[in-house]
Amino acid sequence: MKKTNLVLLLLVMLMTSLSFGQRKKKDIVEEQPEPIAHTPKLVVGIVVDQMRYDYLTRFWAQYGEGGFKRLVNQGFNCKNHHYNYAPTSTGPGHASVYTGTTPATHGIIGNDWYNKETGTDVYCAGDDSYTSVGTTSDAGQMSPHRMLTTTVTDELRMHTQKRGKVIGVALKDRGAILPAGHAANAAYWFEGGAAGNWITSSYYMDALPQWVVDFNNSDAVEVYKKPWNTLKPIETYVESGTDANTYEGMFKGEATSSFPHDLPALWEANGQFGLLRTTPYGNSMTADFALAAVEGESLGVDTITDFLAVSFSSTDYVGHFFGVNSKEIEDTYIRLDRDLARLFTALDEKVGEGEYTVFLTADHAAIDVPAYLKDSKLPAGYLDMKGLQAKFAEFLKYKYGTTDVVKDLSNYQLFLDHKILTNLDIDLKEAQEDIAKELLSYEGIGQVYTAHQMWTNNYTKGIPYILQNGYNQKRSGDVLIVPNPGFILYGRTGSTHGSPQIYDTHVPLLLYGKGIKQGSTVNRTEIPDIAPTISALLGIAFPSGTTGRPIGEVLE
């Protein structure tokens, strides 16, 4: 009896052991490996021109559920996202978002800059070796040839053996060209004037595709030739200042800066279709054309990832003209929110919800109108450029006997004539330092650095770190000027940008869709981190000059 019980006990233990082992083995087999990469059908990169981070929070109550709130609530919000270089302007901003690096590496040091080799000013996207397509003007003589590194869009093209399409769309040529990269299928931008057409360059094609011709021949743009009044009752716009004030610009023919703006009556005196750029209708036109591109180019229809790079430029035009605190800027963002919702709804239908990935950021932020800040008893003001130039000219004549030692001033950088300094037997480093010390004594100028400092030091924080990231050894100047916080070189109405100060560097970064976690972070992230983050998500090579790092918290 005891022997029988022992045998039964051993059999039970053996069966239990085998069953457990089989379950364990089965569990191991059923575990799914982590995907090596995500393959959304479409990536949509959105750059909102001149968007401060606090436009998200300030106008939050005015937004619907399908635009900004959809990105924030269902996606990932980087709340402490910054440009880590200066100048903070459109050309460098778009290039940095897509190259994963800064002007020190990609070479786009401004919208325009002084070319030290030719002694002329150059435009970041200008290229007269190509011809215009879709217009008889020279507005299409453009290419990305001055951008020295690849973009995430270039790397996608290479990774997919050019089967993945890349299309860039923006009102501004540079806002379409630089994000689309060197290997893009196309980049399209808007020409104002009497025609109001979307155009391109022979860099991409010899003739416009039929879908673009059809779009230009339709009334898709003409429908926006109408008065601009607030979308909601103006008394609900409590997140902005008074409607009529001295801090805003006025269109030619207007007696006041207040709503409504009668665009048909202002049409001829303000650039005809070009007038639409400085209204929220310019963003709506961009959304219309972007959706036409999705349809016309069959973006996101198969498993090979395509990329649509869209820049909403009207926010910048409106901000420059009316200012950060205007009713116009509030209305523009309320309307942009609706355009974003319209875009996402269409992508849900055409590409499939959960089958595309979106990121939204800005090419720079902006300062509030210094005159308004000053009237509010905050430290702010304007550089007296005429007075500074006169005083500086006297210094140059006294020190060097001539003003010719300075060739150019652009993007807050002085370019010196090295040949003249050599002929005068003046050491370049000493000249840079002497001029820097002189400029530092002027009212409104807070910091000055030299090219020698940029070459010999490795800055890791603060203003010099930001300046060094924007300093390109071949293209940048000899002396770098930083105005005091709150001080700008600009007109007395409207807002601007370009400085290394935090009001120009703090911008949103929202990510949403396939491969993106839901959540947020207050850890500092920087603009060059965007391209390697998207590259890591897609499993493609990083852009060739990448200095940023993937944001690990964002990716599933």
Image (spheres, rainbow, N blue to C red):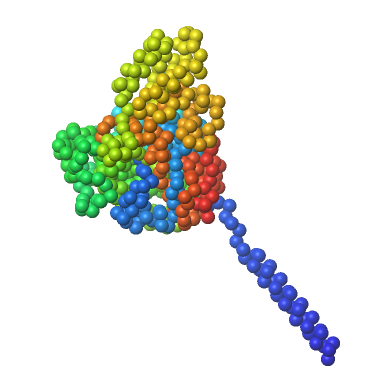
Q: Position of residue 123 (x, y in %)?
A: 38, 27
- List the single residue furthest toward the front: 377
Whether residue 354 appears in this view of the structure is yes
The residue depicted at 47 percent of the width and 12 percent of the height is 421
**Count of marks, rendered view:** 0
- List the single residue furthest toward the right: 3
Q: Quadrant of residue 26?
A: bottom right
* Residue toward you, 229 or 35: 229
Q: Position of residue 485 (x, y in %)?
A: 38, 35
The residue depicted at 27 percent of the width and 47 percent of the height is 240
Quick check: 265 left or right of 511? Answer: left
- List the single residue furthest toward the bottom: 1
Quick check: 191 left or right of 30? Answer: left
Whether residue 310 appears in this view of the structure is no
* Residue toward you, 94 or 485: 485
Image quadrant occupied by the N terminus: bottom right
Q: Quadrant of residue 349?
A: bottom left
Up the image or down, 451 lies above or below 224; here it is above
* Residue toward you, 17 or 73: 73
The residue depicted at 18 percent of the width and 45 percent of the height is 260
